[in-house]
Image: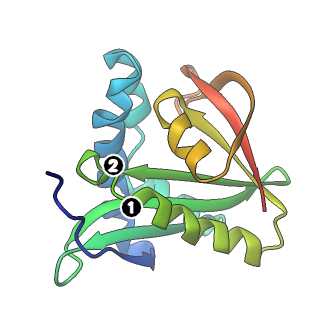
Amino acid sequence: MSVPAPPVYVHRASAADAGRLAAIHRESIETLGAQAYAPELVAVWARPCVPRRYLDQMERGERYFLALAGATGEEVLGFSSYRLEEGRHRTAVFVAARAARRGVGSTLFRAAEAEARAAGATEVHVDASVGAVGFYRAVGFEELGRGEHRLRDGRGAMACVFMRKRL
């Protein structure tokens, strides 16, 4: 018997949420990401998940959305993001393992998708981790090809699937 998902509230993250974004990003990589990648790669991927990263990205225009649960929104379940990068509308979704396959990621993606539409996007792109391809297909993305995503350390790379969703 499955446990029903708690009510989820999505709000646009602010600078005050940078620590929560860092924590949930790291948690998602170290649990769900670890199901698809070697421990050494997971460690390099998670290393730059520090509050300053999200503050810097917000200053450059990236928008984040947090999924919260609990009576006062104390439990962070995941986040999505939207940004315009080198002329492409891009998104990403990360959820806690405890929130996976419970509709949280889809709810978060819809928030980022709405932001992309409001910005005039006709399509959005993602470099999907190997473990997230099924999720992105389920929310309407198509595979464009396979390759590597450069990690923030500038030295590492991880296998990924390049995907697009037409809006």
Q: Nearer the viewer, residue 43 or 56?
A: 43
Q: Is 46 placed above or below 125 here? A: above
- Left of 117 or right of it: where is 98? left
Residue 137 position, x and y percent, is 61, 43
Q: Residue at x 18, y 53 (%)?
A: 2
Mark 1: give few (<14), some (14-19) or many (20+) Cα within 10 Å.
Answer: many
Q: Which residue is mark 2?
A: 100
In this figure, what is the number of numbered marks? 2
Q: Nearer the viewer, residue 103 or 74?
A: 103
- Splitting the image into 4 quarters, where does residue 44 fall? top left
Say which amino acid is labelled 2: Ala
Residue 167 position, x and y percent, is 78, 62
Residue 94 position, x and y percent, is 43, 50
Say which amino acid is labelled 1: Val
Outermost bottom residue:
72
Q: Residue at x 24, y 78 (%)?
A: 73
Asked if residue 140 shows in the view, the reply is yes
